[in-house]
Image (cartoon, grey):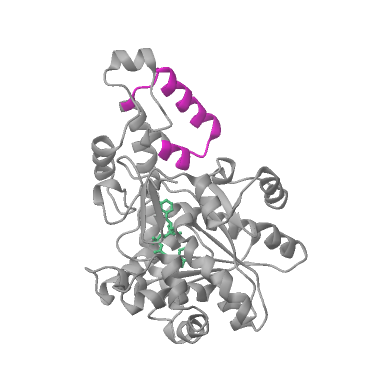
Amino acid sequence: MAKDFVVTPWKVEGDIDYNRLIKEFGTEHLDDALLHRIKKLTGELHPFLRRKIFFSHRDMNWLLDEYEKGNKFYLYTGRGPSGNTHIGHLVPWLFTKWLQDKFDVLLYFQMTDDEKFLFKDNLSLTQTNSLAYENALDVIALGFKQGKTHIFTNTDYSKTLYKNALLVAKKITVSTTKAVFGFNDSNNVGELFFTSMQAVPAFLPSVLKGKNIPCLIPHAIDQDAHFRVARDVLPKLGFYKPAAIHCRFLPALGIGGKMSASEKDSAIYTTDSADEIEKKVKKYAFSGGRATIEEHRKLGGNPDIDVPYQWLSFFEEDDSKLKKIHDDYKSGKLLSGELKLILIEKLQVFLKEHQRKRESARKVLDKFILKD
Ligand code: TYM
């Protein structure tokens, strides 16, 4: 089959066929029966679930079986600090926060400053480490519970992490890392080792508490390769396989692929000003509108390819508002420029508040950080 898109932890490109990814990666659809089961426990469904933005999973039924038996899980997610946080990163984190609230569980949040040093040519370890603490402010700003949320960078929590990464590393051959991640002989040896570090928080609380605790990892589907390896290795070390729940990518502002922190014009960062938001959306957002107003009024726009509409489908929580925008755009009643203004306002309001909380987070950062 022709490969017209790529999804790996380090590269996401092209027009992604998410159903094909489910097949190729061997994950499962997040189907209506499972959504129903989640709703029974949480009382409502997050818009990301209702809209199938979270679309795939591994072992969610097992995780909920354990939960119903009284065996509570913890959450694990993370960030590779290569730059400022963009609003695509917030997608799995917003959902993780919702899960923490609904299930009242602990969160372990890994900042892979080692990864970004190893995989990027232009970043020093000092830079990735300080970016990690800047990114941590965004995590805290989302409202994760103090005392129940532990954020750590791999280099500043290395004594604990390294000992456990060794257990994983010993069970992974070079040929496995080549097959799973596509590495070749020119990759540096740190890159080959790195997946062992990303595996550790998937069982660390079990080590710390001296008993096996189920783990749920919310993330976008690009990180799945790491957890395929972790799921293979962890039972060999006597731990549970981690469960996972996967989201789609918030698209880049221009056409194709996911939003990337290294392409500045394709992303809105959490630190962007109201003016920057307006400028970027107006200038770069790919539109599904027609060439002229007359044509648009007559034929209508195409919300399926329109990036401002796609973004609203992530961030406008009100289903009826979203439907009206969709229908008005499709019928030609709503123009592309007007749709962009709706998005701009939504982002400006959200980010202004986020930036305020992000600054207050500096005062409590220490309370969230694990170091050794
Ligand atoms: P990173 O920094 O590339 O991404 C952080 C999280 O955001 C997700 N993501 C997106 N989600 C929606 N739309 C997008 N456009 C988008 N871009 C990125 C990623 O899937 C990820 O969940 N190696 C990891 C850091 C990490 C981690 C983890 C991530 C360590 N442990 C456990 C998830 C779970 C990384 O570089 O993520």
Residue at image location 59% in from the left, 68% down from the top: 106
**In this view, 68 is above or below 44:** below
Q: Is residue 70 left or right of residue 114?
A: right
The residue at the far front in this view is 1
**In this view, 338 is above or below 171:** above
**In this view, 79 is above or below 261:** below
Q: Is residue 311 left or right of residue 273?
A: right
Check the picture and name the quadrant holding the C terminus: bottom left
Magenta-drawn segment: 310-336
Q: Is residue 91 left or right of residue 284?
A: right
Q: Nearer the viewer, residue 317 or 32?
A: 32
Image location (x, y in percent) of residue 352: 35, 48
Q: Is residue 354 visible?
A: yes
Q: Nearer the viewer, residue 136 or 197?
A: 197
Query: Would you say residue 184 sits in the magenta stretch?
Result: no
Q: For the stretch drawn in magenta, what is the main secondary structure?
A: helix
Residue at image location 43% in from the left, 22% down from the top: 330
Residue at image location 43% in from the left, 45% down from the top: 16
